Image (cartoon, helix red, strand yellow):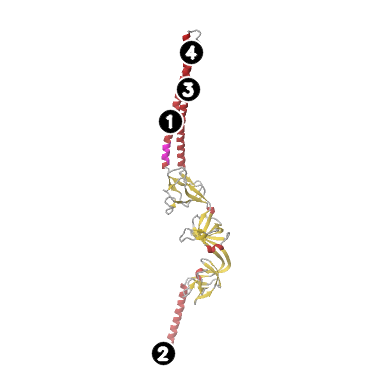
Amino acid sequence: MKRGGLILLFLLLVTAASGAWAYLRLSRSAAVSTVPTAVSRKGEFLVIVSARGELMAERSVLVTAPLNVPNLQLIWTAAPGAPVKKGEVILKFDVSGAKRQLQEKEAALKQAEAGLEQAISNASIAEEQDKLEVASLAHTVKRAEIEVSKQEIVSKLQAEQSRIELDLARSKLKVQQAALEFNRASAASKVAAMRAVADKSQAEVALSKTRISRMEVTSPSDGVLSFLMNFSQGWMNAKPFKVGDNVWPGSSVAEIPDLHSLRFKGKLEEIERARVVAKQPVRIHLDPFPETPFPGDVTSITPLTEQNFEWPPSRSFRVYTSFATIDPRLRPGMNGRADVVVDRLPAAISIPNKAVFSRDGKPFVLVVTPEGNRPVAVEVLARNPDEVAVRGLEEGVRVALIDESGGKKKDGGK
């Protein structure tokens, strides 16, 4: 009886131990499965320097409001960012005021032309009357000359009277001829004055018609339309020009950038400046197309730092990169990141940056095994913002991205 109880107790202990061991193994497996992991890969590792920035166009054509046209107000614009062709209408201004002025100028022109015709007609009539008077006086002079020629056959008194009448007729003829020239010059002056008024009115009508024709602004070149900022309400309230805005004559309203001149302009930290040189390859990642890297090259770096307008203010270098080919979807002002390839490590083992931890100043990774995560010391060869190249790890090894053990600090330095 005592022996049977011992056997039963032994069986119970063995069962409990087996259950505890199975529970422990299951717990470890569950713990391992819940920790995020990654697999090490082998291949070329590109050491990069990242620069955040935006796209800009080196060449662009400004679209300006028409000159010598008052009271300009936008009533229609092409869609911002829309592709436009050379000669296509992109801006329309309110023409109601200009048309009203044109009607007033045309009425003034008709009045001036009527006055000119009246002045020409009056001058012609007056000249004909003066010529008729001169002709009549000339006839009188001829008759007086004939009478004077009879002095040998008439009395002295009658001859003297004929000479007096001849002198008087000649004097009247000279006065009338002078009056004719004076009236002719006066009429010509009046006609010239009226013609000047008519010419002025004609010029004003032509100017009004020209203003109306300028109310529709066409694109000076092919490209995309980008509206400039309207600072009429102050720098703090500046917004791009839109329908309803009043525009100062001759001011710049928009620009049409040349898409073939698109470049990436990024901020380069001072600590990274020495690693970047011209002609290094670049991969440009734009926010609107995060999955599409655009290849290019570094074209230039500013020799001095530039002050930015962010808060807190800081200074940084500017790096400019070109594109190998211009994608038609690209537009100026798109934000993104340029990854400058400063070095290449062939056949390197790379893992996510989050998988590298530090213990006593030495980097290590946690290799995932069925028994749990096993720490393995590694050597960091190069580090990028998202991944690192290490030595001491094989290809295809699964590593943990979180260190759940206490007292261990993740390696965040370079």
- Check disc 4 and give the amino acid type: Arg
Q: Viewer-nearest of labels 1 and 4? A: 4
The residue carrying mark 2 is 5
- Check disc 1 and give the amino acid type: Gly
Q: Disc 4 on helix, strand or loop?
A: helix
N-terminal label among 4 and 3? 4
In this rendered view, identify the residue nearer to me: 348 or 312.
312
Q: Viewer-nearest of labels 1 and 3? A: 3
The residue carrying mark 3 is 178
Name the image quarter holding the N terminus: bottom left
The residue carrying mark 1 is 115
Q: Disc 1 on helix, strand or loop?
A: helix
Residue 102 lies in magenta, yes or no?
yes
Q: Which residues are magenta?
A: 98-105
Q: Position of residue 115 (x, y in %)?
A: 43, 30
N-terminal label among 1 and 3? 1
N-terminal label among 1 and 2? 2
Label 1 vs label 4: CA separation? 47 Å
Residue 342 in sight in this render: yes
- Using the image, determine if residue 103 lies above or below residue 30: above
Displayed quadrant of residue 98: top left
Q: Position of residue 3 (x, y in %)?
A: 43, 91
N-terminal label among 1 and 4? 1
The residue carrying mark 4 is 163
